[in-house]
Image (tube, rainbow, N blue to C red):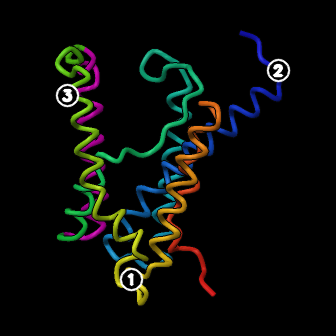
Amino acid sequence: MKMKWWQVGSLGIQHVLAMYAGAIVVPLIVGGALHLTSEQLTYLVAIDLLTCGIATFLQAWKNKWFGIGLPVMLGCTFTAVGPMIAIGGQYGMPAVYGAILCAGAVVVLISPYFGKLRTLFPPVVTGSVVTIIGLTLIPAAVNNMAGGQGAKDFGDPANLALSFGVLALIILLYRCLQDSSARSLFCLAWQPERLPRP
């Protein structure tokens, strides 16, 4: 299908925005739960975006060993948020990095055989996993809605009104916009408590 340059550019920007929001939310949640400083959090987001970029290049480059040859941008998985917070809370960030490297090595080793196991993961199984991931993120979301753990105005009605207002706006726009535009709406939900306050 031949597309015009402005269509390709528009879809590319939407793809980047959707990937960017998903990529930075994971380090923000993990860093917030582990009480990292602003400098450490900046480093965590930067290294996350760098590795997402490297993974995207490897995925887009099709060859004999890896890659699918399609312009697919890779981001973070929310699957690892709970384990990273648990490991980091008990052993610190170096242990989190080590666990990620070990898990990556295991994934590389089992990847040739994993496609054959796909029949063991019907939609009911994958849907249950996604639901469990969402349920484990609820405490972090509620803390952020109330203003952030340890904030002086934690639970202030203004924080809750802002959170529910953003949620209502996203739902409204999602219902009104076309599918391709609606996919990048969760960029609006980036943690408002990290914005400077008057």
Q: Quadrant of the C terminus?
A: bottom right
In the picture of the structure, the residue carrying the numbered disc 1 is: 154
* Alpha carbons under labels 3 and 2: distance apart: 40 Å
Percent x, y of residue 154: 39, 82
Between residues 141 and 18, which one lies in front from this camera angle? Answer: 141
Position of 111 relative to 94 (above/below): above
In the picture of the structure, the residue carrying the numbered disc 3 is: 125
Position of 138 relative to 1 (above/below): below
Q: Please give the name of the residue rendered at 64% of the width and 36% of the height, measured from the top-left corner.
A: 177
Percent x, y of residue 104: 30, 41
In the picture of the structure, the residue carrying the numbered disc 2 is: 4
What is the three-letter code of the residue carrying label 1?
Phe
* Alpha carbons under labels 2 and 1: distance apart: 49 Å
**Disc 2 or disc 1, which is closer to the eye?**
1
What is the three-letter code of the residue carrying label 3?
Val
Q: Badge 2 local density, few (<14 within 10 Å), some, or many (20+)? A: few
- Horizontally, residue 63 falls left or right of residue 131, namely right
Q: Magenta segment, principal secondary structure? A: helix
